[in-house]
Image (cartoon, helix red, strand yellow):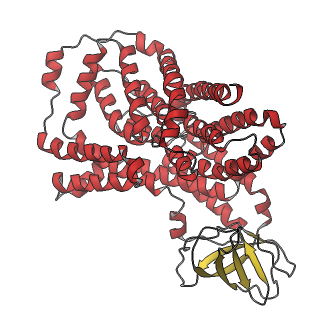
Amino acid sequence: MVDWENPGEPHVIDVISTTGNPQVPPPYYEVGYHVESFDNATHEAAAAVATYETDSSSAHRTLESGGDAVHTAPDVPHHGELTFNLYAATLHPMASSSVLVAGLIMIFVYLFILLEVIHRTLVAIFGSFVALFFFFMMHGGHTESISTLMLHMEWSTLGLLFGMMLLVGELSHTGVFEWCAVRLLIMSKGSFNRLIVLLCGLVALSSAFLDNVTTMLLIAPVTIDMCHILGVDPRPYLIGEVLLSNVGGTATLIGDPPNIIIGSSFEEVGFVDFIVNVFPCIFFFCVPVSLFMITRIYKYYLTSEKMVTLDVRQLKKTYQVYDEPRLLIAGTSTFFVILIFFLHPLHHKDTAWIALLGAFITIAFTNPHDVQDALRNHVEWDTLLFFAGLFVLVEVCAAMGLLQAIGNALAAVISSQPEESQLAIAITLILWVSAITSAFLDNIPYTATMIPVVTILANEMPETLDIKTLAWALSFGACLGGNGTLLGASANIVTAGISTSRGYGMTFLNFLYPGMTVMIATVAIANLYMLVVYVWI
């Protein structure tokens, strides 16, 4: 909070580089710092100099504005000196209801996706436009630049998707997916139940050590080809796989993006800590229960008819690898990309760079003169656009204070409880609120918002709340909550896009019942597990 001495109306400050570049240099003050008063006589921009001071225990920035008055603002880690201009804009009265507006926008977006009036990609894009319109109105008509809006997108996720789509597309032109499908069918020994358990178990284990989006990009085409051979609908298998992908990805630091955020935000939490504290609950309890529930939910589908008798010899003869040179190139690239993904705890490099590099190296050898063919046939552009719109929508709603309001309410309830019950209540509330929120909002910005809330809770109540325990509750809730709806996790959307592109539309309602059922069951198991391990024992 910056306090000008002259009285006036509430204002908001933006930070713009003095070089004239609209991109804000890091570190920056986000739109939303309230200026308690402003010189209404001039309404001119105030030049300011921010100096980083490290000679005291509480580092801060000193803002010098106009005359001799000196003001301080919260610190963002930085070394050296940064000069910028402060521009004030009058807040619209609607800003006082920004959280309500953001909540209503999200409700209407989900309603339109549920009703399928138009394609969900258009719903996400128009929803982001509506959110931006209200956001601009609240800030006096101030419009963010396109370059600033681009910062709202999770480019790491989009880059990873783009790169892996190209790699998987190249592999799909070799016959290797059909070859793998035939081997899985042979292993199932004529049982649909055994087949879905094999597929889902494989996905759960793979997702613990690979990003679950990458796992589904690799497994979904195999599943669809396998079901095509059998003449059955692949959607139950795909939904079961993606649910187990989200469950399995919870087990390790690198399995799901929220875990990566948690691991990079808390020094106390590392790769081994996830293996010790989260892995046992996931693979000893959540995965078996999830597999059982999937077989029960789709019991009629799996038992209503027997699997056709397969001529193994004919299948092997029909579904062979037909482009071995391309498989050698694309397979080698994919192998090294996945290997480097596995080594993420050692190199800490963004997986998007690895996927993009592997994809373009592959295309340089397989399609050196026809890049358009690869971009046109391998990339699910509607899925990427849906993600882009959804990222902007959620980030703008977060800027309106929606996620922060959820975090503040959670912190207020926990801090008001008796000391002896604070830990149990904190675990339960963080876990369930995170799960429910992540089912309807992207869990990446939610996790980033909850990190400071968890830190403040642990610092204010160090005797009762251990920061590592709260981190596990946040991880369980944010990751397992992604199973709640089709939009809860990136892997869900990717799988729906692949299924739709192959002629099997996957709707919000198709996903809702199995997803929400598995989410409630696994979150309840994680809650009980945490209470037993960290509170009652």
The residue under the point 72% across, 53% down is: 101
In the displayed structure, does residue 487 sit left or right of residue 60? left
Q: Is residue 189 left or right of residue 89?
A: left
Q: Is residue 197 above or below residue 278?
A: above
| Of 467 and 68, the residue lying toward us | 467
The total number of labels drawn is 0
| Residue at the (40%, 38%) spot, across then down | 209
Q: Does residue 118 show up? A: no
| Residue 507 picture location, percent across and down | 50, 34
Q: Residue furthest bottom?
A: 67
Residue 67 position in % (x across, y down)? 78, 90
Q: Quadrant of the C terminus?
A: top right
Q: Residue at x 51, y 41 (%)?
A: 489
Q: Along the line of sight, which residue is nearer the eye, 97 or 68?
A: 68
Quadrant in which the N terminus is drawn: bottom right
Work out whether residue 205 can be spotted.
Answer: yes
Query: 137 or 180, which lies in front?
Result: 180
Task: Choose top left, top right, bottom left or bottom right for residue 85.
Answer: bottom right
Residue 242 vertical placement versus 136 (above, below)? above
Counting from the top left corner in percent of width and height, residue 28 is at 61, 71
**Res 136 → quadrant:** bottom right
Judge from the rendering whether residue 507 lies leftward or rightward of residue 453; answer left or right. left
- 204 lies above or below 186: below
